[in-house]
Image (cartoon, rainbow, N blue to C red):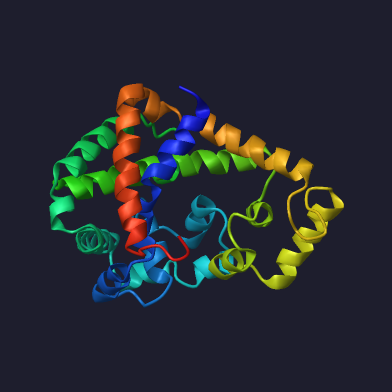
């Protein structure tokens, strides 16, 4: 199996997992248990498996958000709702949103059940060493319903890869703000969206971009130069290589089938408009 296969499989499942960060059901369930509307639900629900941790733990494990943004909601979230109640709210939101986006026939159908079994087998090939967010999520019980088990497996695979991606960034001397500016330089995601969601001040962003231009990593328009593309590709190649374990555990036939099923389900999620801009 080639390292790039890890990226293709992650992409096949990502919308099925990632929709929870955008659907209205998430905000509804989080506010129902006491959290404040807005970004608190995202930070609290994703970090809740770690327990009621301080902001610095979330800053470290989420990596690329401005520290002040994290500190605006963590640890305050734990005074409003327990991690256990937040996790229960998140699972209710996943259930409600998937049933709305896919319909009961798909959610309760054979393809979801098959994909859940394959994804769980893949997730069993992950390991906790050096993967703090994955390890925290892996400590949660598996949901009984297939569509929720598939979502949980996708979460484990996503956090396993994400932890490895941070390791690759750090190994290449790339800090959180630099990682974002480089991402913006690919043109894959609009810079204004990265700035808005990660909340780095304009002056800090522009200062880092100027440094990267001086280093030959960005061109005058803020796009990656050949040197910049090589740096980013090095990070992506490392991320792929150290994300292979679950897919090797599943095997080529299982990976091919899970990619087919995952792509189909993710296309339905995207077609329903669950993720803005996709």
Vertical side of 120 occupied by 48: above or below = below
Q: Residue at x 39, y 48 (%)?
A: 14
- Regarding residue 207, the answer to whether it shows in the image is yes
Front residue of 192/278: it is 278
Q: Residue at x 82, y 54 (%)?
A: 213
Q: Is residue 156 left or right of residue 141?
A: right
Position of residue 164 in the picture relative to residue 150 (left or right): right
Q: Residue at x 52, y 33 (%)?
A: 240
Residue most extreme to the bottom: 37
Quarter of the image for residue 226 reads top right
Front-lying residue, 86 or 113? 113
Q: Is residue 83 above or below residue 119?
A: below
Most foreground residue, 178 or 186: 186
The answer to whether residue 242 shows anywhere in this view is: no
Q: Position of residue 99 (x, y in %)?
A: 19, 60
In this rendering, is residue 41 above or below 134?
Answer: below
Quadrant of image for the C terminus: bottom left
Residue at the farthest right position = 214
């Amino acid at each position: 199996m080639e390292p790039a296969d890890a990226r293709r499989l992650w992409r096949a499942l990502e919308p099925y997992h990632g929709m929870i960060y955008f659907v209205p059901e998430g905000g509804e369930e989080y506010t129902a248990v006491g959290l404040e509307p807005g970004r608190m639900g995202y930070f609290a629900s994703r970090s809740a498996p770690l327990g009621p941790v301080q902001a610095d733990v979330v800053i470290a494990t989420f990596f690329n958000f401005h520290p002040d943004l994290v500190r605006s909601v963590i640890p305050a979230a734990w005074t409003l709702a327990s991690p256990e109640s937040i996790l229960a709210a998140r699972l209710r939101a996943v259930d409600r949103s998937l049933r709305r986006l896919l319909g009961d026939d798909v959610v309760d159908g054979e393809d979801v059940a098959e994909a859940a079994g394959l994804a769980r087998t893949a997730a069993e090939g992950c390991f906790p060493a050096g993967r703090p967010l994955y390890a925290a999520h892996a400590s949660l019980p598996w949901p009984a319903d297939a569509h929720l088990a598939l979502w949980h497996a996708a979460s484990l695979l996503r956090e396993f890869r994400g932890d490895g991606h941070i390791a690759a960034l750090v190994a290449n001397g790339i800090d959180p703000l630099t990682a974002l500016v480089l991402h913006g330089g690919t043109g894959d995601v609009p810079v204004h969206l990265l700035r808005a969601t990660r909340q780095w001040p304009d002056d800090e962003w522009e200062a880092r971009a100027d440094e990267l231009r001086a280093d030959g990593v960005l061109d005058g328009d803020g796009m990656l130069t050949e040197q910049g593309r090589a740096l980013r590709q090095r990070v992506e190649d490392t991320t792929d290589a150290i994300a292979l374990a679950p897919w090797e555990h599943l095997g080529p036939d299982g990976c091919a089938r899970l990619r087919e099923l995952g792509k189909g389900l993710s296309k339905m999620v995207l077609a329903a408009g669950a993720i803005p801009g996709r």
